[in-house]
Amino acid sequence: MRALSALEGVVVAGQGSHITALVRSHASGDEEAFYSVALQVAAREARQGHHRLAADIKKAVDSSRQTRRAPLAAVAEFPRSQGDLEDLVELSHPQVRLRDLVMSADLAAQIGQVIREQRQRAVLVEHGFMPMRRLLLEGPPGTGKTMTASVIASELSLPMYTVRLDSLLSKFMGETASKLRAVFDTSAAQRAVYLFDEFDALGGDRSGNDVGEARRILNTFLVLLDGDETDSIIIAATNHRTILDRALFRRFDAVLTYSIPDAGQARDVIRKRLGSLARGARLSGLNALTEGLSHADLVKASESAAKIALMRGDTSVTANDLKSALVARRSASLG
């Protein structure tokens, strides 16, 4: 690994903990933790006036990350003939892995089953079975739905297209059918994970007065979904299952339900985000502060605590750092 070789000879007074963290993250295969510690070393070297060494380390990290993403660089973009979809579709190449998810064992098993079926799809098809490829993810905001789509894409070495359905309603009135058709046409030409985010904007029960454009969009989506026989994975994510039209549910191979993390899961989320920075921090006394916070809230609080510690010159966060960050996050999210 180029980033590792660039750090050879950096063991100087006061950096033993960094080197230990580098070795541990490298041995465990946690690349993002490795890169994070490497950049901490670069920052420290820069503060000590070793600017050339700091620049070399940063360059090695950036190069290593780009090399990891290179196999996905040749992904086809949406055909220009389909019109401008920049405000509707976002292309990404996720690097998050299944082991990075923090959730119930049952939910993790369901996601693992989807991935295994996709990896063995040729065997299943040969015997007359189809792998799961149409998923509905439902649960409160920030509980891991988008991350799940990213994990599936990463584990299958596929790009991910995120389709913003709220933009479809607000910015493309009158041309929504053609925009949706362009997305499904691309799913036939480019095997990928297609995440239809904020799906409740499209799939809400429209039996009342709102039967105009939204109903036409929904009908178009159902027709396109019914006719979709590609190898791409179609994922719809919603925060409000109860308002979805019942006609949608039978179109999906599986419905995965997400929830706010319990105390143990909350600690796992914090540990995973902090990596080596969590070493020595007592997390058992944080239950009251993590209660009710989503995965996304916990990640943001962890990042805030990490920045406090790093700017102080420390290589690990304290319980007080986390308490302060969690209190601030609770105030912002829960009021």
Image (cartoon, rainbow, N blue to C red):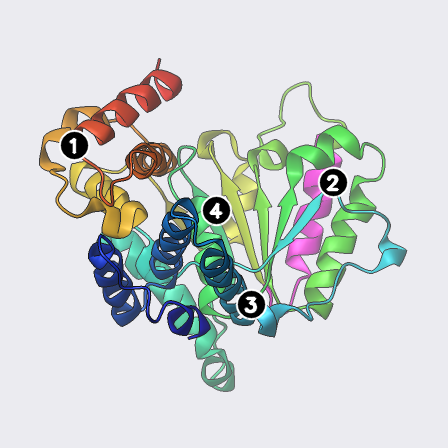
Counting residues from the N terminus, which is met first, the one under dot 4 or under dot 3? Answer: 3
Which residue position is annotated with label 4?
Answer: 146
Which is closer to the viewer, label 3 or label 1?
A: 1
Distance between the alpha carbons at the discs numbered 4 and 2: 18 Å
Given the image, on which type of amino acid does mark 4 rest?
Thr
Lower position in the chain sequence, tag 3 or tag 1:
3
Mark with earlier residue (2, 1): 2
Q: Is 242 placed above or below 32 here?
A: above
What amino acid is found at the position of numbered circle 3 in the picture?
A: Arg
* Residue labelled with disc 3: 69
Q: In the rendered view, does 325 fall on the left or right side of 97?
A: left
Question: Magenta region's main secondary structure?
Answer: helix
Point out the tag, 3 or 2, that comes first from the N-terminus: 3
The mark found on residue 319 in the picture is 1
At numbered mark 3, what does the secondary structure look like: helix, strand or loop? helix
SS type, badge 1: helix
> Callout 1: 10 Å neighbours few (<14), some, many (20+)?
some
Query: Is residue 186 a member of the stretch shown in magenta?
Result: no
Q: Please say if 111 is above or below 176.
A: below
Range shown magenta: 214-232
Residue carrying label 2:
87
Q: Kindly identify the amino acid type of the residue bearing the numbered disc 2.
A: Asp
Q: Is residue 243 left or right of residue 325?
A: right
Residue 118 placement (x, y as % from top left):
47, 72
